Image (cartoon, rainbow, N blue to C red):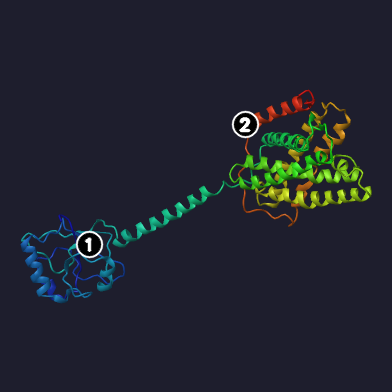
């Protein structure tokens, strides 16, 4: 091995006879430094080689034979290879001095080696051996902590920036898409599907009504039953979406529109004796008891089940600050409420039956049935609806949602608004 490290350990403080030799280097400090913890000296073999025979003989004869007690710490030779690791050496040698930089003293002209003082003096920085051991360990701990932090960041969605606001245009676009789908679920899949299931034949489908050749109680109840089934389904899907804020909000709106339609139709039919469930209970006696029962069922399902459930599922978009939660909830609920109502009325104005359906179907189902969106943000005041630890990222401007909303709105108003007739098929 071409290079190795040697350790120079000075012995105990030399006696006065140690000063007798003239071959000591000028200005060389002959006293052994005080024992101070964490101070170790090293030299490089490039500057000190034992192959020089005169130096070796002198070192052996002068240091070992004349003063065998020169190493007070361990009683070993003053010159030895650093074959021991630092922990072993510290246990044996006690405290050591640790200069910032060391080098071997110059050789004497006659090839002798001075015995009376240390063979090293400051020159350049030599890293502490313990630093060399501790620094990689500290680096590994930092790397592990950073890796854990990155893994946590990757496994969880980006956090909501409470100082920002969701994009209103994108919220309105998502509301348009959800309104069109929820309306088709009620009229097309609900009433139309039950019409086909009971052997009837579809006649007309519009945004505010459905006509079947066999107008039965099951056909009348089909719309609400479809809203209930799909409302629960969209609730499950919304909770499964963890990263995309716009898609989670979209499924949340679909859940809300469908479940509000269920409670709203019960309440509306019970109080006004019009609508789908008024047709379902028509002729059942006593009529007042059925109407009271429908109204009570509507109050319970709408105000005590659907609205609190919808608001709790919205918490992941609101943040944790009390004031910010209310402002964000108002933005995320009132905007789709107004959007859905205006769209339903615009399409309902073209229905083939008459203006009455605009009032009792389009306006009642949208502005009336979805009215919970207009006021439920007030429930966030106080401890009734606590904040959620899980938070979604911000709803940002989305060109895709806006384009899809424009296409769906045009088809909803111009296509389903005037009604689609099937009787000629």
Q: Nearer the viewer, mark 2 or mark 1?
A: 2
Vertical relation: 310 (above or below) 364: below
Quarter of image, res 3: bottom left
Q: Residues within 10 Å of mark 1 (few under 14, many from 20)?
A: many
| Residue 174 % position (x, y) | 68, 36
Instruction: Give percent across and percent down for residue 187.
Output: 77, 35
Where does the image place residue 385, in percent across and percent down from the top left?
Answer: 72, 54
Mark 2 is surrounded, within 10 Å at the Cα level, by few (under 14), some (14 to 19) or many (20 or more) other residues, namely: few
Mark 2 and mark 1 in contact? Answer it, CB < 8 Å.
no
Picture quarter with the C terminus: top right
> As rendered, which of 23 and 410 lies closer to the eye?
410
Q: Which residue is mark 2?
A: 400
In front here: 303 or 211?
Answer: 211
Q: Residue furthest top?
A: 424
Residue 205 visible = no
Q: Nearer the viewer, residue 320 or 43?
A: 320
Mark closest to the chain's N terminus, 2 or 1: 1
On the picture, is 113 further left or further right than 347? Answer: left
Q: Classify 394 as above or below 169.
A: below
Residue at 77 percent across and 47 percent down: it is: 376
Q: Identify the residue at image location x=25%, y=65%.
A: 85
Circle on res. 42:
1
Q: Which quarter of the figure is the N terminus placed in?
A: bottom left
Q: Is residue 193 left or right of residue 51?
A: right
Circle 1: element type? loop
Residue at 28% from the left image edge and 64% from the top image edge: 98
Query: How far across and how far down the image is residue 53, in percent?
Result: 6, 62
Q: Nearer the viewer, residue 424 or 332?
A: 424
Vertical relation: 249 (above or below) 382:
above
Quote the CA–CA distance across marks 2 and 1.
69 Å
* Residue 121 in view: yes
User: What secondary structure is marked by label 2?
Assistant: helix
């Amino acid at each position: 091995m071409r290079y190795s490290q040697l350790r120079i350990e000075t012995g105990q403080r030399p006696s006065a006879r140690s000063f007798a030799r003239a071959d000591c280097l000028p200005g060389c400090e002959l006293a052994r430094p005080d024992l101070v913890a964490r101070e170790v000296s090293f030299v490089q073999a490039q500057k000190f080689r034992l192959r020089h025979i005169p130096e070796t003989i002198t070192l052996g004869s002068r240091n070992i034979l004349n003063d065998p007690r020169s190493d007070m710490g361990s009683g070993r030779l003053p010159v030895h290879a650093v074959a021991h690791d630092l922990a072993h050496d510290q246990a044996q040698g006690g405290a050591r001095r640790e200069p910032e930089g060391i080098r071997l003293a110059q050789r004497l002209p006659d090839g002798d080696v001075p015995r009376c003082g240390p063979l090293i003096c400051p020159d350049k920085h030599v890293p502490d051996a313990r630093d060399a051991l501790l620094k990689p360990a500290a680096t590994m701990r930092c790397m592990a902590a950073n890796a854990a932090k990155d893994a946590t960041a990757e496994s969880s969605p980006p956090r909501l920036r409470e100082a920002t606001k969701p994009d209103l245009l994108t919220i309105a676009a998502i509301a348009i898409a959800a309104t069109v789908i929820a309306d088709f679920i009620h009229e097309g899949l609900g009433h139309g599907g039950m019409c086909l299931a009971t052997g009837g034949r579809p006649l007309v489908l519009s945004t505010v009504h459905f006509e079947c050749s066999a107008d039965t109680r099951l056909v009348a109840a089909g719309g609400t039953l479809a809203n209930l089934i799909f409302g629960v389904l969209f609730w499950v899907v919304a909770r499964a979406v963890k990263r995309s804020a716009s898609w989670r909000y979209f499924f949340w709106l679909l859940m809300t529109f469908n479940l509000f339609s269920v409670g709203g139709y019960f309440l509306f039919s019970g109080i006004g004796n019009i609508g789908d469930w008024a047709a379902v209970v028509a002729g059942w006696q006593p009529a007042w008891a059925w109407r009271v029962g429908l109204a009570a069922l509507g109050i319970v399902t709408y105000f005590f089940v659907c609205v609190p459930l919808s608001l709790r599922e919205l918490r992941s978009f609101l943040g944790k600050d009390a004031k910010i939660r209310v402002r964000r909830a108002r933005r995320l609920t009132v905007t789709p409420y107004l959007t859905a109502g205006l769209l339903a009325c615009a399409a309902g104005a073209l229905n083939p039956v008459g203006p009455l359906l605009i009032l009792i179907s389009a306006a009642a189902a949208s502005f009336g049935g979805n009215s919970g969106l207009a006021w439920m943000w007030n429930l966030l005041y106080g401890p009734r609806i606590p904040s959620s630890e899980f938070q979604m990222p911000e709803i940002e401007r989305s060109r895709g949602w806006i384009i899809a909303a424009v296409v769906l709105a045009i088809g909803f108003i111009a296509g389903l608004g005037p009604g689609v007739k099937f009787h000629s098929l």
